[in-house]
Image (cartoon, rainbow, N blue to C red):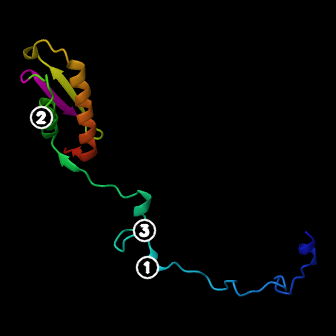
């Protein structure tokens, strides 16, 4: 505190006894070679405002994709199972079992797996109208 009281200010408001060699008097501009963004990218790309365009598929194609993935699950019936895709954005799927499926001990697992497949496909595709 005593040093602060003893320091004298010059007319510019600087302390007279301090060296001014490190004082920057010009504005600092960003260095272009240190830029974190590629040259061709828009300036707002780093803020997550650019959205990827999803491919559009017909509802029947999406239902066929879900059914094909379900067919790979052990214990999935080959007959009497159907998938319906409905809605546009966000779209949903409905898994139904007919009488030809017979007794189905893993019905809940198949429905949960259908939901997982649907969520994965929702990130990739939109329903074409």
Residue highlighted by disc 2: 68
Dominant secondary structure of the residues highlighted in magenta in the image: strand
**What range is drawn magenta here?**
78-86
Can residue 79 be found in the magenta stretch? yes
> How many numbered marks appear?
3
Rendered view: 20 above or below 87 = below
Q: Residue 24 sits in which quadrant?
A: bottom right
Residue 113 point in image, percent of width and height: 23, 29
Residue highlighted by disc 3: 43
Q: Residue at x 15, y 34 (%)?
A: 69
**Nearer the camera: disc 1 or disc 2:** 1
Q: Is residue 73 left or right of residue 90?
A: left
Q: Residue at x 41, y 56 (%)?
A: 48
Q: Is residue 1 left or right of residue 107?
A: right
Q: CA distance from mark 1 to mark 2?
A: 50 Å
Lower position in the chain sequence, tag 3 or tag 2: 3
Q: Residues within 10 Å of mark 3 (few under 14, many from 20)?
A: few
């Amino acid at each position: 505190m005593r040093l602060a009281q003893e320091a004298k200010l010059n007319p510019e408001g600087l302390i007279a006894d301090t060296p001014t060699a490190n004082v920057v008097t010009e504005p600092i501009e960003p260095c272009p070679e240190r830029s974190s963004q590629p040259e061709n990218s828009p300036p707002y790309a780093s803020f997550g405002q650019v959205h990827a365009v999803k491919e559009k598929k017909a509802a029947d194609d999406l239902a066929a994709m879900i059914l094909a993935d379900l067919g790979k699950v052990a214990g999935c019936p080959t007959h009497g199972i159907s998938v319906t895709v409905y809605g546009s954005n966000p779209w949903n799927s409905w898994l139904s079992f007919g009488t030809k499926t017979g007794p189905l001990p893993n019905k809940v697992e198949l429905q949960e797996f259908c939901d997982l497949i649907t969520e994965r496909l929702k990130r990739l595709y939109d329903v074409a109208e």
